[in-house]
Image: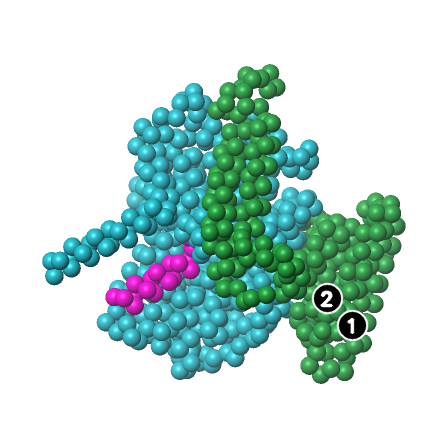
């Protein structure tokens, strides 16, 4: 594949984004045409200028117009040709690999936000996430990054499978605490396994040690600040919050 | 309010804030946090204000504003640390400061350069505040005459100008970003008929998209992805030396200080255009007007002073349209608007009627924030500089966790987290393709204003469009929008080229 200039790369991106935005505009318009334009809604007689469709139609119209212009410009500037050639040559794999870090960060954020945070005690959900981020991007050892990431994703997938299988214990129930404990155990195992690979590496070991400290201290500190300082409930409160409550009220 | 009353209110506000020792700690602490956010490459003033907004939303409005403004002022100034010592601007606002700040540090004047930026930033912030106090009431007086016609067009103008000026590639991409923001704002039940739009029968979307998770997603997630992807390596830091507020150099460059402040205020007042542009324009103007332009870029204090004064003066300018019209003047001001909305305050011309002393209170907080920044800058700069040794890959994951918790804390809803994630990932890819995200965010914020006022205006005129063209301010705004769009068309560019050729022929013949 021949080397593309930044200008062609931008116009190629314009070609795809213009198509996506055009589709969004058309969808918005079709959907808005279903809203009451005239006639009667909820017993109130409607006229076009107070219709809830008026503004979305205007915005959709503008999006279609502007993305159409962008598309034409991309075609004229050679962006469409470059995009189609790339598609025909199956060069998407190369593009994907060159942005692998972007996909890793997105995947980890998605796993944390969609799978872990709503189900597991906030601190326990955050410990393996932070540790993995730091193992991948701070420790900078490919073996550490690969192992840390694989175990983190395995924890997330297993949790998803268990939830999909119907194990959804109520908040602060015994099942909830057990699930927290299992994930915490898995996080400890992840840390121990990753640490065992670099503990003799004089450069990587201090970084990993720092990562472990940050991964544990940050979620605990944030949990205390939000829960007791700002009086904001955490997304999911389980084992760690229970322990904190017991410490706070001497309930042993 | 008479001038005397305003002074009385100003000093009463100052006294009120300073009478609580907790406010002192908040001022110094938030300012220091702001400086750290500004100094650390990978963190920005916008992100700092956004994250602090989530931490302070349980505070009363005044206390939250003290923290947020101290953070804002500190972060804009803090960018100069890494610009001067590492040649990496901590924020875009300080990019111009690196031009002369870094060469000064290279020749062993790092402390002097930091002292200069500290004092220049203090002066810039104070002049910005003065401009805010002087011009905001005039804008409010004018805006109080506005009706729905003008407010709809004002929102449209805000999006068009933000898209035009912020686009680093094709201008049409800036406009598209603005209209995507408007499209996002239509999600939820409309406020006039309560009809569900684009909610897909999901009750969580009935109230529309929460602004703060959208803002955090749009500004934090792209920053986190970019920072981690780049795996930036720590550069060798220049020696600092003694940090001294070199008043002599400031006095010598007084004309640059005054001019840069005015440039900063003017640029800040333009919707969506931030401190970075103010810094560059001011630096360019200083260089063009200096008798020694060849010294710029080689450690000329005038260049450093110009850039730093302008970016901090921009804060007052950015608050002007925010507090008077409800249109944020810069990306951090967008976050500030989100924070004000969280506290149930809707900025706009009515604010001066609902809370007549609000502007004065803001001015008092800005003065204190500037002083806190100066004290921190002179006394604690050496400690802050130590933070520059922390690599972004160590603190960005922590920022990600803070963003998640901050987005959740506002509505106590996991849906906010999904919203933040989706908007954040989309914002990252849009940024990579040179779509200005600030224009998109301004679209989200101004969308409800545009929607409601368009329909109200048409209700008043019973569907007649002529009042849009017969009301003077409406006509001015329409003309401005049309002009902004027309100058971007190929037809205009062709005409300009032909006019240029014609002029050169004419002058050529005369010569």
Left or right: residue B356 versus residue A180 is: left
Q: Nearer the viewer, mark 2 or mark 1?
A: 1
- Where in the figure is residue A77, as x and y percent of width and height? 47, 54
Say what secondary structure mark 2 lies in.
Answer: helix
Characterize the local packing of mark 1: few (<14), some (14-19) or many (20 or more) Cα atoms within 10 angstroms: many
Q: Which residue is mark 1?
A: A194
Check residue B357 in the rendering and tell me which mark sits there, or answer none.
none
Q: Residue at x 60, y 16 (%)?
A: A43
Residue A98 in the image: above or below residue B443: below
Q: What secondary structure is the magenta-colored segment mainly?
A: helix
Characterize the local packing of mark 2: few (<14), some (14-19) or many (20 or more) Cα atoms within 10 angstroms: many
Q: Was residue B416 drawn as part of the magenta stretch in this picture?
A: no
Q: CA distance from mark 2 to mark 1?
A: 10 Å
Query: Can you name the residue that lies furthest to the left here?
Result: B510
Say what secondary structure mark 1 lies in.
Answer: helix
Q: Residue at x 77, y 69 (%)?
A: A147
Left or right: residue A230 versus residue B475 is: right
Which lettered chain is shown in cyan?
B
From where the camera sits, is residue A220 visible?
no
- Where in the figure is residue B186, as x and y percent of width and height? 56, 36
User: Quarter-wise, where is residue A138 in the image?
Assistant: bottom right
For the N terminus of chain B, the quadrant is top left
Check residue A131 in the rendering and tell me which mark sits there, or answer none.
2
The answer to whether the residues at label 2 and label 1 have Cβ atoms under 8 Å apart is yes
Which tint is chain A? green
Which contiguous range is marked in magenta?
Answer: B273-289
Left or right: residue B470 versus residue B49 is: left
From where the camera sits, is residue B85 visible?
yes
- Where in the figure is residue B341, as x and y percent of width and height? 53, 42
Compare marks 2 and 1 and give the one earlier in the sequence. 2
Residue B472 in the image: above or below residue B437: above
């Amino acid at each position: 594949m021949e080397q593309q200039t930044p200008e062609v790369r931008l116009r190629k991106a314009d070609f795809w984004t213009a198509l996506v935005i055009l589709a969004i505009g058309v969808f918005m318009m079709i959907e808005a045409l279903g809203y009451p334009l005239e006639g009667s809604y909820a017993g109130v007689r409607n006229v076009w200028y107070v219709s809830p469709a008026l503004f979305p139609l205007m915005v959709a119209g503008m999006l279609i117009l502007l993305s159409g212009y962008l598309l034409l410009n991309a075609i004229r500037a050679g962006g469409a040709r470059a995009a189609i050639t790339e598609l025909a040559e199956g060069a998407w794999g190369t593009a994907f690999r060159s942005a692998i870090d972007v996909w890793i960060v997105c995947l980890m954020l998605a796993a944390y936000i969609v799978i872990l945070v709503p189900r597991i005690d906030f601190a326990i959900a955050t410990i393996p996430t932070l540790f993995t981020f730091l193992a991948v991007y701070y420790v900078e050892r490919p073996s550490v990054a690969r192992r840390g990431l694989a175990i983190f994703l395995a924890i997330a997938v297993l949790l998803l499978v268990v939830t999909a299988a119907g194990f959804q214990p109520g908040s602060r129930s015994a099942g909830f605490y057990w699930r927290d404990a299992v994930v915490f155990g898995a996080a400890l195992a992840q840390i121990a396994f990753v640490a065992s690979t670099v503990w003799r590496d004089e450069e990587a070991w201090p970084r990993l040690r720092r990562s472990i400290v940050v991964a544990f201290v940050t979620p605990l500190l944030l949990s205390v600040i939000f829960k007791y300082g700002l009086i904001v409930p955490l997304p999911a409160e389980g084992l760690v919050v229970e322990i904190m409550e017991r410490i706070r009220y001497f309930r042993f | 309010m008479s001038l005397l009353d305003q002074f009385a209110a100003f000093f009463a506000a100052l006294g009120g804030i300073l009478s609580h020792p907790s406010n002192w700690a908040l001022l110094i602490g938030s300012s220091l946090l702001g400086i750290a956010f500004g100094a650390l490459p990978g963190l920005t003033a916008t992100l700092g204000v956004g994250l602090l907004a989530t931490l302070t939303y349980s505070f009363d409005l005044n206390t939250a504003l003290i923290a947020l403004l101290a953070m804002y002022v500190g972060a804009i100034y803090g960018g100069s640390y890494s610009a001067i010592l590492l040649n990496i601007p901590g924020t875009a606002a300080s990019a111009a400061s690196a031009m002369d700040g870094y060469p000064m540090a290279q020749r062993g004047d790092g402390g002097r350069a930091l002292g200069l930026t500290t004092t220049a930033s203090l002066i810039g912030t104070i002049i910005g505040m003065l401009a805010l106090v002087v011009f905001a009431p005039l804008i409010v007086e004018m805006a109080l005459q506005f009706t729905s016609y003008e407010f709809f067009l004002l929102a449209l103008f805000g999006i068009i100008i933000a898209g035009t000026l912020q686009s680093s590639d094709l201008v049409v991409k800036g406009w598209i970003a603005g209209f995507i923001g408007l499209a996002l704002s239509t999600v939820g039940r409309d406020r006039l008929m309560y009809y569900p739009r684009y909610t897909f029968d999901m009750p969580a979307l009935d109230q529309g998209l929460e602004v703060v998770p959208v803002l955090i997603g749009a500004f934090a997630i792209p920053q986190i992805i970019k920072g981690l992807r780049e795996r930036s390596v720590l550069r060798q830091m220049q020696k600092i030396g003694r940090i001294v507020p070199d008043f002599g150099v400031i006095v010598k460059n007084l004309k640059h200080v005054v001019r840069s402040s005015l440039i900063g205020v003017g640029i800040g007042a333009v919707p969506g255009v931030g401190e970075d542009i103010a810094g560059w324009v001011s630096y360019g103007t200083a260089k063009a007007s200096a008798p020694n332009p060849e010294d710029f870029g080689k450690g000329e204090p005038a260049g450093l002073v110009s850039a730093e004064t302008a970016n901090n003066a921009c804060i007052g300018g950015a608050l002007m349209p925010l507090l008077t019209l409800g249109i944020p003047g810069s990306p951090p001001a967008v976050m500030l608007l989100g924070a004000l909305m969280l506290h149930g305050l809707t900025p706009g011309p009515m604010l001066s009627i609902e809370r007549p002393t609000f502007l004065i209170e803001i001015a008092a907080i800005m003065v204190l924030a500037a002083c806190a920044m100066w004290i921190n800058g002179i006394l604690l700069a050496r400690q802050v500089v130590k933070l520059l040794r922390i690599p972004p890959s160590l603190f960005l994951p922590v920022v990600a966790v803070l963003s998640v918790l901050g987005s959740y804390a506002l509505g106590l809803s996991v849906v906010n987290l999904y919203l933040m994630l989706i908007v954040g990932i989309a914002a990252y890819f849009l940024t990579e393709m040179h779509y200005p995200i600030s224009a998109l965010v301004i679209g989200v914020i101004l969308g409800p204003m545009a929607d409601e006022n368009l329909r109200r205006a048409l209700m008043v005129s019973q569907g007649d469009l002529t009042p849009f063209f017969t009301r003077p301010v409406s006509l001015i705004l329409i003309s401005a929008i049309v002009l902004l769009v027309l100058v971007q068309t190929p037809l205009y560019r062709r005409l300009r080229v032909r006019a240029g050729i014609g002029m050169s022929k004419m002058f050529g013949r005369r010569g």
